[in-house]
């Protein structure tokens, strides 16, 4: 059925970054994250049921640290057994991965690959950096290690705005600003392509980039967590915004790659410890309703694939 639709509808891929409760607590500075509290037993069956209902397969980027803990193995194995693609989302989930040395990058990838393969039985061929962290060294090493694609770029203008605000308030010297020029992403990131492209690398192996889609022209976020954030003000407005993004993708020939997170399936009623997070004032029932509408809008207009399939179709064309 998917093969017939490939000719009729443009391509879209779905992915979910399986950030766990501890990584949000760590960023927020909450104590107790060191015990790696997990909501995987709750959220994994919930999103697997959801995608089963729509008969869709997606790519789930797993954090190696979670795969290293026996308490998460059952939930992680369920994802692989349901036929979804397993991707690598680093081991430690540190958004400053782009500052790692080559040895540290190799160690980070090796650890994650070993534990993810042990927990799921699958070795990833796709990578997404934590917090969209990416560097030339990382891409070279991914290509050398046999990865087919990277999915760490986020062509948005909003990251540099955050950095400008940081510079304005932190009173940094020019030299210090130079050191921090990559913080929150470069200004040029907003001009990066939205469609997949091959990286030009020293490595003899090929590596394709599949960017996280932002709204064509405006380059503002359209990932599902952002739509849910908007729907905490008005669901009608949020869905209009998303429909505009889909229309612009179709008009501009942009191959959609839509990003989801576990918190898109969890309400403040499920995880009180994360009540501080945007859109956690919504219940899980409300969120599931909005996510259902988002997925239905996409599947009406696009052929939905995993990122591995998206990369393979792109590779056949160039
Ligand atoms: Zn993440």
Image: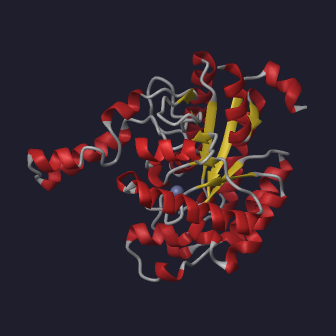
Q: Position of residue 234 (x, y in %)?
A: 54, 45
Quarter of the image with the N terminus in it: top right
Quarter of the image with the C terminus in it: top right
Q: Position of residue 129 (x, y in %)?
A: 50, 51
**Is residue 277 toward the left or the right of residue 8 in the image?**
left
**Residue farthest to the right?**
1
Q: Which of 175 and 318 is in front in this view?
A: 318
Residue at 60%, 16% (x, y): give it.
251
Q: Position of residue 204 (x, y in %)?
A: 56, 34
Residue at 68%, 42% (x, y): give it.
14
Residue 64, quarter of the rendered image: bottom right
Is 211 drawn above or below residue 46 in the view shown? above
Q: Nearer the viewer, residue 193 or 115?
A: 115
**Residue farthest to the front?**
204
Colouring scheme, one of rainbow, by chain, secondary structure, one colour? secondary structure
Number of dots carrying numbers: 0
**Is residue 78 toward the left or the right of residue 226 in the image?**
right
Residue 252, quarter of the rendered image: top right
Is 58 drawn above or below residue 254 in the view shown? below
**Is residue 217 toward the left or the right of residue 269 in the image?**
left
Residue at 56%, 41% (x, y): give it.
143
**Residue farthest to the top?**
251
Q: Nearer the viewer, residue 37 or 287?
A: 37
**Is residue 103 toward the left or the right of residue 125 in the image?**
left
Q: Where is residue 218 in the image (x, y as percent from the top left)?
A: 44, 27
Q: Can residue 269 be seen in this view?
A: no
Residue at 85%, 50% (x, y): give it.
53
Q: Is residue 237 visible?
A: yes
């Amino acid at each position: 059925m998917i093969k017939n639709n490939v000719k009729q509808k443009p391509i879209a891929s779905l992915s979910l970054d399986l950030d766990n409760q501890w990584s949000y607590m760590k960023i927020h500075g909450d104590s107790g994250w060191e015990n790696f509290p997990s909501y995987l037993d709750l959220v994994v069956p919930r999103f697997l049921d959801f995608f089963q209902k729509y008969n869709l397969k997606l790519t789930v980027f797993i954090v190696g640290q979670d795969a290293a803990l026996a308490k998460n193995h059952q939930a992680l194995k369920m994802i692989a057994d349901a036929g979804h693609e397993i991707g690598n989302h680093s081991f430690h989930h540190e958004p400053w991965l782009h500052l790692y040395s080559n040895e540290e990058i190799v160690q980070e990838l090796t650890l994650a690959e070993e534990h993810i393969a042990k927990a799921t039985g699958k070795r990833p061929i796709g990578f997404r950096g934590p917090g969209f962290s990416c560097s030339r060294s990382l891409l070279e090493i991914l290509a050398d290690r046999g990865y087919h694609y990277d999915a760490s770029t986020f062509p948005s203008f909003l990251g540099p705005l955050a950095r400008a605000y940081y510079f304005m308030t932190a009173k940094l010297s020019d030299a210090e600003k130079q050191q921090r020029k990559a913080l929150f992403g470069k200004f040029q990131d907003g001009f990066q392509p939205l469609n997949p492209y091959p990286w030009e690398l020293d490595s003899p192996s090929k590596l394709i980039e599949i960017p996280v889609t932002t709204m064509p022209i405006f380059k503002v976020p359209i990932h599902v967590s952002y739509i849910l954030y908007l729907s905490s003000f008005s669901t009608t407005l949020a869905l209009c915004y998303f429909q505009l993004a889909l229309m612009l993708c179709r008009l501009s020939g942009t191959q959609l790659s839509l990003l989801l997170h576990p918190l898109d399936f969890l309400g403040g009623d499920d995880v009180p410890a994360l009540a501080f997070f945007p859109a956690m004032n919504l219940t899980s029932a409300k969120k599931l309703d909005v996510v259902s509408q988002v997925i239905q809008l996409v599947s009406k207009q696009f052929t939905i694939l995993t990122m591995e399939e998206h990369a393979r179709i792109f590779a056949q064309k160039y």
